[in-house]
Amino acid sequence: MNKLPEVKAFINGEFQKDYLKTTYTKIPGKSPEAVFYNEAGEELERLDISGMKRTELRELMEAKGIKKKPVEEEEEKPAGHDEI
């Protein structure tokens, strides 16, 4: 995947940390694919993503209805303890 910096950056970045119900499985010697399943675990679609840019991968996740994890709100800081 070193020859695919956009795909690698997406998978190692937002795909693994920002999206719900997603997993990454590395298969040596195989082009990266996105595989979509229904609630019963049946495969619905398999797409070769090797030629995609990071923005296209984000758009794909949105188009397929893959939701992002909720953003955790920063904890409230006690009054008078502002960071500089």
Image (tube, helix red, strand yellow):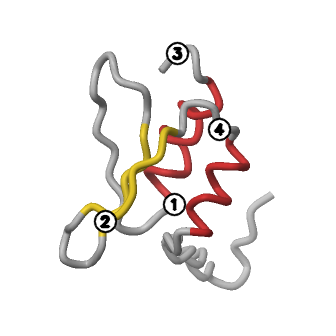
Residue 75 placement (x, y as % from top left): 56, 78
- Residue picked out by circle 3: 2
Q: Earlier in the sequence, mark 3 or mark 2?
A: 3
Direction front: furthest residue:
45
Amino acid tagged 2: Tyr
Q: Residue at x 34, y 67 (%)?
A: 21
Q: Earlier in the sequence, mark 2 or mark 1?
A: 1
Residue 42 placement (x, y as % from top left): 21, 67
- Residue picked out by circle 1: 18
- Residue picked out by circle 2: 37
Q: Considering the numbered disc 1 on the image, is that residue within a helix, a strand or a loop?
A: helix
Q: Residue at x 27, y 27 (%)?
A: 27
Q: Considering the numbered disc 3 on the image, is that residue within a helix, a strand or a loop?
A: loop
Q: Residues within 10 Å of mark 1 (few under 14, many from 20)?
A: some
Amino acid tagged 3: Asn
Badges 3 and 4: C-beta atoms under 8 Å apart?
Answer: no
Mark seen at residue 52: 4
Q: Quadrant of the C terminus?
A: bottom right
User: How far separated are the C-alphas under marks 2 and 4?
Assistant: 20 Å
Q: Earlier in the sequence, mark 3 or mark 4?
A: 3
